[in-house]
Image (cartoon, grey):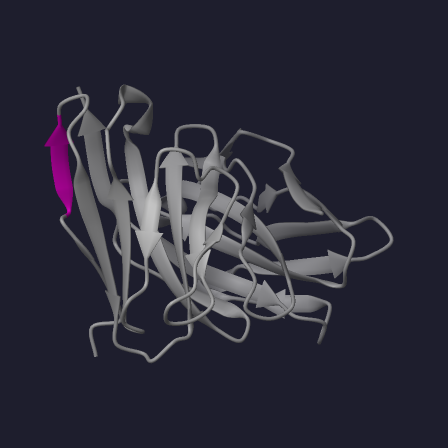
Amino acid sequence: AQSVTQLDSHVSVSEGTPVLLRCNYSSSYSPSLFWYVQHPNKGLQLLLKYTSAATLVKGINGFEAEFKKSETSFHLTKPSAHMSDAAEYFCVVSRTGNTPLVFGKGTRLSVIA
Amino acid sequence: NAGVTQTPKFRVLKTGQSMTLLCAQDMNHEYMYWYRQDPGMGLRLIHYSVGEGTTAKGEVPDGYNVSRLKKQNFLLGLESAAPSQTSVYFCASSIYNEQFFGPGTRLTVL
């Protein structure tokens, strides 16, 4: 069985400061891990994915995440927040391959000017 | 190349009415999925399909039926809608390790 826990339901940062969105996972298999972003009233966009290659994964819009097997974590970071980063972020786990995704409950990121 | 499309975008139903949501993809993907999104719950899997003519239950299948008669289409049916089915519904298709999502259907059941 697989599950994902997003440790914060809401994170608020000031524009230009670092972003850290925390995610822990549980998986009986070697997992694939993803971060998706959803802007208000929009669909889901893939930010980045980990599929057992490099443990530090770079995504779009300056985001990156590090897979830490010993800590079962896949935290999302960005050095400097922009107003346009305000959105809902989902950490997602699946088995490798075409298997259904298991979503975390989401973290809402607010960016203050 | 439209990707994944969903019809309709919005719908309001009365309790007990039925409807079908259509998902179409033009990427020749074998795998397709239906999720629902509720506030504070993330996305939860309703049903999925690993190929034409096959379907399987996900985490929250009760009250829904699906069909995959053609590879490019995946239909989600509500036979007798209930207020608890008010949600945003997302369809996705996948290849290898990436799922591609449609824009969503916002359904309200009164």
Q: Is residue A85 above or below residue A105?
A: below
Q: Is residue A111 left or right of residue A58?
A: left
In the rendered image of this protein, does residue A92 appear above or below residue B106? below
Q: How many marks?
A: 0
Q: Is residue A35 above or below residue A56?
A: above
Q: Residue A97: where, in percent of width, then height?
A: 60, 71
Residue at the (47%, 41%) spot, across then down: B44
Q: In the rendered image, is residue B2 in sight?
A: yes
Closer to us: A5 or A21: A5
Relative vertical location of residue A20 with respect to residue A62 in this rendering, above or below? above
Q: Is residue A82 visible?
A: no
Q: Position of residue B101 (x, y in %)?
A: 35, 59
Q: Position of residue A71 (x, y in %)?
A: 83, 48
Give the residue displayed 21% in from the left and 49% down from the top.
Answer: B21
Could you tell whether B18 is left or right of A64 in the image? Answer: left
Magenta: main secondary structure: strand
Indicate the quadrant where residue B22 lies: bottom left
Does the magenta segment cover residue A105? no
For the N terminus of chain B, the quadrant is bottom left
Quadrant for residue B3, please give it: bottom left
Please report the bounds of the magenta region as a residue range: B9-13
Q: Quadrant of the C terminus of chain B?
A: top left
Q: Residue at x 51, y 36 (%)?
A: A107
Magenta stretch encompasses residue B10:
yes
